[in-house]
Image (cartoon, helix red, strand yellow):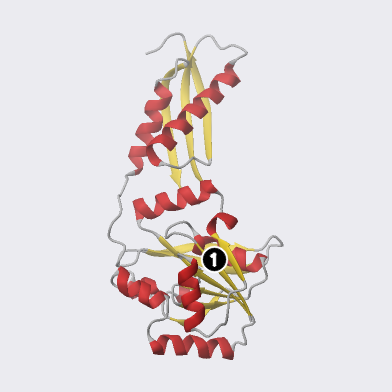
């Protein structure tokens, strides 16, 4: 069997990218947080995200319980798995999983920095720290919702470059994820509004929309001060850069897009 490892700190987006990465390198199965996922579908195991605390979650993820371990080993044989990706927080953890499941030595070690950009990692960490959200690389219908009293929602469908569906994700907030900082959307709006209002060419910030989804963006409508000259495009770009720098300074990751619309031009600042 071909065995690969993917490791990185918690909250960096390993599970988010697992399905696409496994498909890219030709691995048919994934072990993630105690689950065996074959071709995008959970076929065995119990998720560590069902656990009540981090200690039991880690034990679940490394198959410390014999029955859990044996059930997954049996499924590996039943589905005749020939290639697999083991996901963990470190090489030590994935080696432990390989040992418990009798998979033999790991052939290749990958790291989250190999498959995600620094920008994506920073955003994933921010979402984990402020919303407590975890991603499971399994379909929504396969998640036992009673275990997630706080949140269970659909993630996204994962497609190959050829638009072949290779799986789905589900977003959850486990019981053990109790420490996170909840930031209201208005906080982001106020920061962006304040930053734009400081610009010398802005008479008034008419409206700011902030969208915190897979693509994090802001749409800003401003009223400018006359006169408008041929340097306007450069000035708008400078405003975008100022918003980006301020956002990164306060929240530790960059916006994916900053869209500025000009509604009107006034003779002087209000």
Q: Secondary structure at mark 1?
A: strand
Residue 190 relative to residue 232: left or right: left
Q: Is residue 194 visible?
A: yes
- The x and y percentages for residue 231 are 60, 15
Residue at position x 50%, y 66% in the image: 169
Q: Is residue 2 left or right of residue 192?
A: right
Q: Is residue 187 above or below residue 196?
A: below
Residue identifier under label 1: 6
Quadrant in which residue 30 is drawn = bottom right
Q: How many marks?
A: 1
Tell me where residue 220 appears, x and y as whole percent: 47, 31
* Rendered-image quadrant of the N terminus: bottom right
Residue 121, position in %: x, y?
49, 51
Nearer-the-camera pick, 184 or 31: 31
Rendering quarter of residue 114: bottom right
- Farthest residue to the right: give it: 162
Indicate the position of residue 123 as horizontal and vertical percent values. Answer: 46, 48
Closer-to-camera residue (211/47): 47
Image height of 46 relative to 123, above or below: below
- State the residue in front, 125 or 239: 125
Crowd class of label 1 (few under 14; some 14 to 19; many from 20; radius 10 Å): many
Taking 156 as reference, is 203 left or right? left
Residue 145 visible, this angle? no
In the foreground, 33 or 96: 96
Q: Which image quarter: residue 163?
A: bottom right
At 35% from the left and 33% from the top, the residue drawn is 190
From this view, report whether residue 203 is shown above or below residue 250: above
Q: Is residue 174 left or right of residue 80?
A: left
Q: Quadrant of the C terminus?
A: top left
Residue at the image point whose x is 44% and y is 37% from the top = 248
**Image: 114 above or below 32:** above
């Amino acid at each position: 069997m071909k065995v690969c490892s993917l490791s990185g700190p918690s909250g960096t987006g390993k599970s988010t990218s697992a399905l696409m990465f496994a498909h890219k390198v030709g691995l048919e199965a994934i072990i993630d947080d105690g689950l065996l996922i074959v071709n995008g579908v959970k076929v065995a195991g119990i998720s560590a995200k069902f656990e009540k605390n981090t200690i039991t979650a880690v034990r679940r993820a490394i198959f410390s319980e014999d029955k859990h371990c044996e059930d997954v080993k049996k499924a590996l044989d039943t589905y005749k798995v020939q290639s697999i990706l083991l996901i963990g927080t470190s090489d030590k953890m994935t080696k432990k999983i390989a040992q418990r499941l009798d998979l033999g030595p790991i052939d290749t070690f990958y790291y989250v920095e190999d498959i995600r950009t620094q920008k994506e990692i920073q955003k994933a960490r921010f979402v984990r720290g402020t919303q407590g959200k975890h991603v499971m690389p399994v379909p929504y219908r396969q998640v036992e919702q009673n275990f997630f009293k706080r949140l269970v929602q659909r993630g996204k469908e994962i497609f190959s470059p050829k638009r072949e569906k290779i799986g789905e994700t589900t977003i959850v907030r486990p019981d053990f994820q109790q420490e996170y900082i909840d930031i209201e959307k208005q906080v982001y709006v106020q920061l962006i509004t304040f930053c734009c209002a400081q610009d010398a060419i802005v008479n008034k910030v008419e409206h700011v929309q902030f969208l915190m989804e897979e693509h994090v963006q802001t749409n800003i409508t401003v009223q400018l001060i006359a006169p408008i000259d041929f340097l306007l495009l450069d000035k708008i770009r400078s405003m975008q850069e100022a918003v980006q720098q301020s956002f990164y300074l306060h929240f530790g990751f960059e916006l994916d897009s900053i869209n500025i619309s000009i509604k009107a031009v006034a003779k002087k600042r209000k």
